[in-house]
Amino acid sequence: MNRISQYDVYALPVADIFYDAAFNCRRPVTVLSVQDLARSIDDIGLQAPVVVQPWTTKPYRLVSGHRRFVAVAKILKWSTIPATIREMDSAQAHLLNLIENMEREDLNIVETAQAISNLSANRTQDEVAAILQRSNRWVQVHLRLLTMPEEVQRWAAAGVIGFGHLRDMAGLPPEEQIKYVQAVIRARGQRTSKPGLNFDGPARKRSKDELAHMTQLLFDRDISGLPTRLLAWAAGYLETETIMKELPQCEQ
């Protein structure tokens, strides 16, 4: 039986690990978004160690397992966490972080594009495509998204437009890309229009403070069910899969 030292797991002090929120290719992990995960870890234990690399400001930097780390450090208040220590350069660290998040399938398309951009430093598109086992076209469309107008990127992140839309509008000038997205939104609005909803103009992006304030207003009025949790989802505090489990099922 051969020992593979690369996968040795250590009980590292949480205080020795630098949590670099900007490094993680997912949106920032909030305490509210990992409450269910924390309960699971508390019940059955941590099923996979986090991965860290030797660092400068602290002994280690967290590379993968950001949700697990927040659940353990912020909610469960563990003093140590099982971790694998890996020697790696910046490109290898970004790659490991991206692959883990892609396997979870909860990155939005803009987060994926930004992570691919990080991975593309000193690599060709062909090399990136080979590493991710995706087509060169797939990599190209994602990278092109980052050059599109901010309005287009916001709607892409929200899931209003997808990979097919981005591929179709790739050759359009920026102003035509915006018109394309607006046409998609109008078409969706005609199919799902409700009183009080306006899909004709640009959406007003709510701040986290506004969403938190509205959530608190609902709690103050004893409205603590799905509407409140939908606001928490909109603010990024709950995962889509959690909300989907709570939505009533439509009869077929």
Image: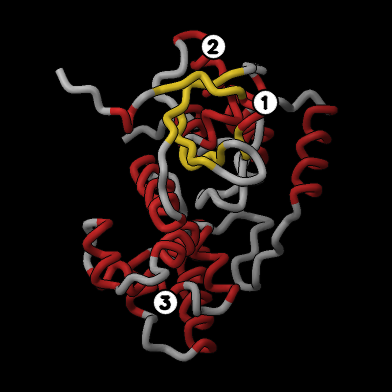
Residue 80 coordinates in the image, percent (x, y): 58, 19
Q: Name the residue under label 3.
A: 144
Residue 47 coordinates in the image, percent (x, y): 40, 19
Helix or strand or loop: what does disc 2 sit on? helix
Q: Name the residue under label 1.
A: 74
Give amino acid for label 1: Lys
Above or below 231: residue 170: below
Above or below 205: residue 22: above
Q: Looking at the picture, tell me which residue is in the foreground, 241 or 75.
A: 75
Give amino acid for label 2: Asp
Q: Which residue is drawn at 66% across and 65% down?
A: 203
Q: Left or right: where does residue 135 sit relative to residue 149?
A: left
Residue 101 coordinates in the image, percent (x, y): 41, 45
Query: Dots 1 and 3: beta carbons under 8 Å?
Result: no
Observer able to see residue 34: yes
Write down the quadrant of residue 150 in the picture.
bottom right
Q: Disc 3 to disc 2, how far (Cα)?
A: 42 Å
Q: Looking at the picture, tell me which residue is in the foreground, 216 or 86.
A: 86
Q: Mark 2 points at which residue?
A: 42
Counting residues from the N terminus, which is met first, the one under dot 2 or under dot 1?
2
Residue 54 coordinates in the image, percent (x, y): 52, 41
Q: Disc 1 to disc 3, how far (Cα)?
A: 37 Å
Counting residues from the N terminus, which is met first, the one under dot 1 or under dot 3?
1
Q: Residue at x 41, y 58 (%)?
A: 91
Helix or strand or loop: what does disc 1 sit on? helix
- Local packing at callout 3 (Cα closer than 10 Å; few below 14, some 14-19, many 20+) is some
- Local packing at callout 1 (Cα closer than 10 Å; few below 14, some 14-19, many 20+) is some
Above or below 21: residue 219: above
Q: Quadrant of the C terminus?
A: top left
Give amino acid for label 3: Arg
Observer able to see residue 191: no
